[in-house]
Amino acid sequence: MRRFSGIAIALALAAAACTGGGGTTPPPDKLGVVEIPPGEPLHIAFWGVLSGANASLGEDSKRGVEIAIDDKGGKLLGHTIELTSEDAQCTPEGGATAAQKLAADKTIVGLIGSSCSDETAGGMATLNAAGLVTISPSNTRPQFTQADRPAEFAGYLRTAHSDAVQGKVAAEFVYNQLKLTKAATIHDGSAYAEALANVFAESFKQLGGQIVAQEAVSKGQTDMKPVLTKIAAAGPEFIYYPIFVAEGGFITAQAKEVPGLENVKLMGADGMFSPDFVKAAGAAAEGMYLSSPDFTAFGGDYAGFLAKYKAKYGDPISIFHAHAYDATNILFAAIEKVAVKADDGTVYIGRQALRDALYQTKDFPGVTGTLTCSQYGDCSAPVIAVYQITAREVGGQWPPEKPIWRPEASPGS
């Protein structure tokens, strides 16, 4: 299978036309053009965490991509859809390695991913330089869709919410609903966790609360008692630790064993919204809170999508499956919009044209809501709520049946 630059394709087709070959000439594209000959697949790829303690986050999203492909009958523009994946391991280094592999494959039309914000931070420069575009279903770091984002994010969009929303909702729940005024935060050094913990802290202080401690743990750390003991000395009523499955499990399991924290309320976020977290934390997870997308307030036919998910895989194992489904369908719609099909069935897709079409997405009927992409790639319809883990979830049933609290402005409140 051959791949040419946009200029090379234009010249080749012009030559064919001069010799009577006919066909449709695609417009030149400054980032190049993907050529898909008759009988060859249309190649998209998923990149995200697919191994280790946080594998459920990436696998859940990948399943959303697969259902979107199923809904197309496995074909787009007359070509079989080929899905490949790269494990980005939820680290900057893993994201960089995955991006290098993806950038080297000139057959890829577009990407869904990454899962973790660290992966995107590590890989986005490489993907952008290769002319690739990616839509993340679960990156939530605010900077990625802000006006001051780095230039290499020109090829980046997301259907996930920004944690500028999630952090504020979590703070409102603690201050206004729980009526607590002293909070502490813990992050794990990741782009996701540090940003979300900071948004929570700033929002909590603006409401009138006091942040008595802001601490950090390391990925891979298992003994959390030193940092928890330090936090206990500051006298918090509440601890917000928006981190991931493994470290979140250790903090939850050990917190009540630290003098001074016996009655302190605990809360994680969407990075821990998984049955794997409950297994890691054990019985200590009962009663704690999680901030996360409000699946009961999703727009569109989420119920129909969920039925397909359960029939194919069983119960969801994380929270971003629907966001991945929407991201994939937005990608498919943009591909259909810009693709040029020659008389012989060859399909040409301009990389810059595809980016432009994605950024022009408006009022897309997704299952997470009606989606319109901003000039900085924010395509989300953010609806965040708070869930509480009960004996039901500790006993093995997942996910929680419904949120216990949502902001008054949120749909369904």
Image (cartoon, rainbow, N blue to C red):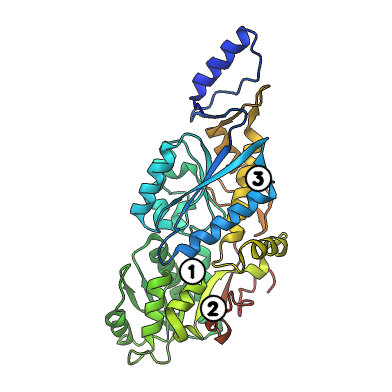
Circle 1: is it few (<14), some (14-19), or many (20+) Cα within 10 Å? many
Q: Type of residue at label 1?
A: Gly
Identify which residue is drawn at 51% across, 71% down. Answer: 274
Q: Type of residue at label 2?
A: Phe
Q: CA distance from mark 3 to mark 1?
A: 38 Å
Q: Type of residue at label 3?
A: Gly
Q: Which residue is mark 3?
A: 74
Q: Nearer the viewer, mark 2 or mark 3?
A: 3
Q: Secondary structure at mark 2?
A: helix
Q: Quadrant of the C terminus?
A: bottom right
Precedes in sequence: disc 2 or disc 3: 3
Where residue 13 sits: x, y (%)? 58, 16
Judge left or right: residue 72 versus residue 197: right
User: In the picture shown, does residue 246 fall above or below 356?
Assistant: below
Q: For residue 253, what is the image quadrant?
A: bottom left
Circle 3: is it few (<14), some (14-19), or many (20+) Cα within 10 Å? some
- Nearer to the camera, 350 or 94: 94
Judge left or right: residue 384 versus residue 188: right
Judge left or right: residue 31 versus residue 311: left
Identify which residue is drawn at 60% across, 53% down. Answer: 66
Q: CA distance from mark 2 to mark 3?
A: 43 Å
Q: Secondary structure at mark 1?
A: helix
Q: Is residue 369 visible?
A: yes
Q: Give residue 167's mark.
A: 1
Where residue 322 sits: x, y (%)? 61, 59
